[in-house]
Image (cartoon, helix red, strand yellow):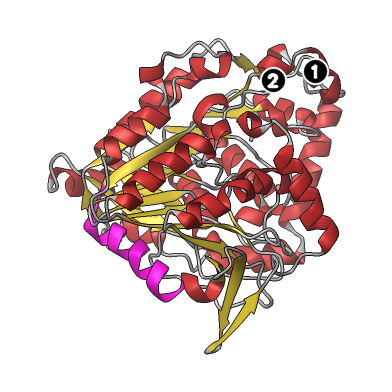
Amino acid sequence: MTTRLGGACEPLVQAHSGRSGVVPLPDGHDAFAARALLADAAERTLDLQYYIWHNDMSGTLLFTALRRAADRGVRVRLLLDDNNTTGLDALLAALDAHPNIEVRLFNPFKARRWRLVGYLTDFKRLNRRMHNKSFTADGQVTIIGGRNVGDEYFDAGQAPWFVDLDVLAIGPVVSDVSRNFDRYWASALSIPAARLLRKATPASLAAVAAEAARVEHDPAAATYIQALRRSPFVRDLLAHRLTLEWAATRMISDDPAKALGHAPEHALLWPRLKESLGAPVQALRVVSPYFVPGTAGVEALARLAGQGVQIAVLTNALEATDVAVVHAGYAKRRMALLAAGITLFELKRGSSRRKANRGRWPGGSGTGSSGSSLHAKTVAVDRSRVFIGSFNFDPRSARLNTEMGFVIDSAALADAIAERFTDEVPTRAYQVRLGDGGEMHWIDRDDGTEVVHAAEPGTNAWRRLAVSVLSWLPIEWLL
């Protein structure tokens, strides 16, 4: 028997043979609503894979949506990387106790309370994490991208928020995501929660249920839920009204054995991504919150620039980054990138909450705040192909963590990214340039004015000194 989601998707997929239908989710509210509404629409299966799942308002609401689905008889499989599950053991055990929910933890810590001890005694293993993000309902609809689960990823609660990007997809690529999930689920590193966590007791189950009820009835949550009910994505999908971009779409993912250091080169995402995107001829535009190209990356980008390829990169400014040590790995390469003719933009932290741009920009929503930070990961090659996923352009994503994403053959999405680099990025980000004497300047454009900063804006001398010192350390391979 076909599910509601299957009944909505299958006629569309048959009408676009060989292609997948995709729609970017740049707005945090829409990204949350799509997940919650898919959980409520699911009739057979929900498969979820995440690096971070916070036990905050949005995380609790989605946990509750999973329980509702399981109560209806939906089989729920939840695979979480164990690096960020501190404080979640009782809740995860309660979920796992449901007959229709199974929880597994990827590359888990043996010491549940003292994580630092694990890092000190087993650093080589625990330093490798599962950074993948996917949410798949009934094998018919999937959401992948940069967002973890938590208020800061969905514009919920108080600042700071992340400027992020997911993509919702139907069609052949969904089967690829499902097979990839099964591969990770069956990995030797995916350990059933029942083998790691204390068994849920009636008292712990009651405490978890009470906390979920408290969050659901909180006035802030009620306001948020009411706003989400206006989100059109799943409702329009079921009613055949959702506008999709139909394109050849390939899922690429690391072999889970990468987390053991055992995956061969051909099974890694980074070489497959370079092959799938192909060499740019005219333009390359990169959006990455953590951009650490290293010596080899700088040389490769410089060669492309020398061949006439226009290259622009958007990353976080020091004032906006949430990981200063990673910014140090980028900052030490900045001068060489600029000297090679590469355009660098650094997202501002923001001074006020701006009206959300609910358009289809694949570089993130137009929301800015006093605490906004870039978290989207995407790249556009010429007017032909786009990558959207979990992969940061840094050594950690390339060599240590497992990652996944979509390569989409879409001129429309590539053009949308190019347009934002031309129209919006210059006002939302500082442009870094070299002065006549070889010194760096940060160009701040806003309201038709242009201000030139001689030092990284929004930072003090101590923070800049700390980043400078960090850039001298031989830790680039960890970033």
Residue 469: mark: none
Mark 1 lies on a secondary structure that is: helix
Q: Find the residue positioned furthest to the bottom.
A: 448
**What residue sits 68% from the left and 58% below the top?**
318
Q: Is residue 411 magenta?
A: yes
For marks 2 and 1, give the CA distance. Answer: 8 Å
Query: Does residue 198 appear in the picture of this structure?
Result: no
- Give the number of marks: 2
Q: In which quarter of the image is the C terminus?
A: top right
Q: Does the magenta stretch include residue 449?
A: no
**What residue sits 44% from the left and 47% below the top?**
41
Which contiguous range is marked in magenta? 409-424
Residue 81: percent from the left, percent from the top? 63, 28
For label 1, count other residues whose C-alpha is less than 10 Å away and answer few (under 14), some (14-19) or many (20+).
Answer: some
Mark 2 lies on a secondary structure that is: helix
Residue under pointer 1: 118
Residue 228: percent from the left, percent from the top? 55, 64
Mark 2: amino acid: Leu
Above or below, 472 relative to 436: above
Above or below, 49 relative to 65: above
Residue 422: percent from the left, percent from the top? 38, 72
Does residue 249 appear to the left or right of 199 in the view shown?
left
Contact, mark 2 vs mark 1 (Cβ under 8 Å): yes
Mark 1: amino acid: Gly
Residue 126: mark: 2
Query: Does residue 236 appear in the picture of this structure?
Result: yes
Q: In which quarter of the image is the N terminus?
A: top left
For residue 335, what is the image quadrant? bottom right
Of the pair 433 and 127, the residue shown nearer to us: 433
